[in-house]
Amino acid sequence: MAGGAGATWEAAEVRAVVEAHCAAADVRDWSAFAATLADDMVYDLPQSRERVLGKVRYVQLNRQYPHDRQVRIERIVADGEGRQAAARTLVTVGAEEMRAVHFFTFDPDGRIAGVTDFWPESYESPAGREHLVERY
Amino acid sequence: MAGGAGATWEAAEVRAVVEAHCAAADVRDWSAFAATLADDMVYDLPQSRERVLGKVRYVQLNRQYPHDRQVRIERIVADGEGRQAAARTLVTVGAEEMRAVHFFTFDPDGRIAGVTDFWPESYESPAGREHLVERY
């Protein structure tokens, strides 16, 4: 990425880093995965109030996932102006398919400085709005 | 918004529509809320597999929410190039505070064509990674 403080960022650059990050997670290329990360990056899981401090621990957390995990990108929202991104992925572990939502921030060199993940689970449709919604 | 097919979009324009949409929901200004929406917009809730077709029904769904709902924006990711956005909000209904994640797409005139919402609930920290994570 054409980085450096004060450089103009393009959404395409932000998008490319997110794609490289997710692709490396999918194929378990931990060297390529680490290359997308700032050393002092922070990983945040608001739902469980967990935080992982630093690239070394974050890579280790990912290494210990089951070996049959697959990560498929559904959508990337790339904000060059704000040096941030959001993504939706489908994560498959064995027979289980999980939806994930990721928010990314970047350091001035174009490495990921922060990842905040959400894992939204399925729930039953609430009563009282059947006249407004379709089910699928 | 400076709209029209083929016009160059700026992240700032995308951001402004998301801000106007959330602010209108917060103060229950349904006229301003509807003004941010395309007539044939689609609202999607993947967790409950629900879909709402059209601005009229989507406004009605929001009107029937409790009157003490508050919507506070935490973060907006605005992708002018992709004509899309993502946002995180904190939604308060009475004493309950809920996290929400929203993905937006836009029509060529700068109105919201699609909203996909996720409501990630709290969960317990999984065992086996205590050596890597901090709790908060």
Image (cartoon, coloured by chain):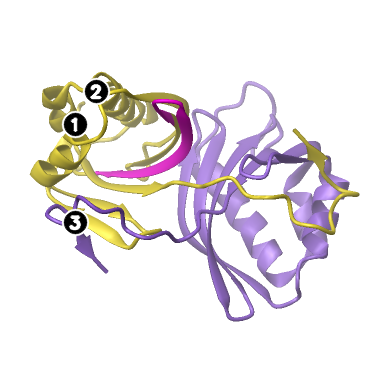
Chain colours: A purple, B yellow
Horizontally, residue A122 falls left or right of residue A67, namely left
Q: Is residue A26 above or below residue B77?
A: below
Q: Which residues are magenta?
A: B91-106
Residue A59 percent coordinates (x, y): 81, 54
Q: Quadrant of the C terminus of chain A?
A: bottom left
* Residue that mark 3 sits on: A133
* Residue that mark 2 sits on: B24
Picture residue at 20% right of the left edge, 27% below the top = B2
Q: Which mark is residue B36?
A: 1
Task: Identify the chain of the residue marked 3, using the numbered disc in the image.
Answer: A
Residues at discs 2 and 1 in contact (Cβ within 8 Å): yes
Q: Which mark is residue B19?
A: none
Task: Give the distance between the C-alpha atoms of the residues marked 3 and 1, in whole angstroms.
Answer: 20 Å
Horizontally, residue A100 falls left or right of residue B86, namely right
Horizontally, residue B25 falls left or right of residue A14, namely left
Residue B64 percent coordinates (x, y): 19, 36
Amino acid type, label 1? Thr
Picture residue at 70% right of the left edge, 78% below the top = A68
Task: Identify the chain of the residue marked 1, using the numbered disc in the image.
Answer: B
Q: How many marks?
A: 3
Q: Which of the two residues, B11 or B134, is positioned nearer the viewer here?
A: B134
**Closer to viewer: mark 3 or mark 1:** 3
Which element carries disc 1, helix, strand or loop? loop
Q: Main secondary structure of the magenta part?
A: strand
Q: In terms of sequence position, does the residue under pointer 2 or pointer 1 come before the other?
A: 2
Residue A16 in the magenta stretch? The answer is no
Picture residue at 68% right of the left edge, 23% below the top = A5
Which element carries disc 3, helix, strand or loop? loop
Asked if residue A127 shows in the view, the reply is yes
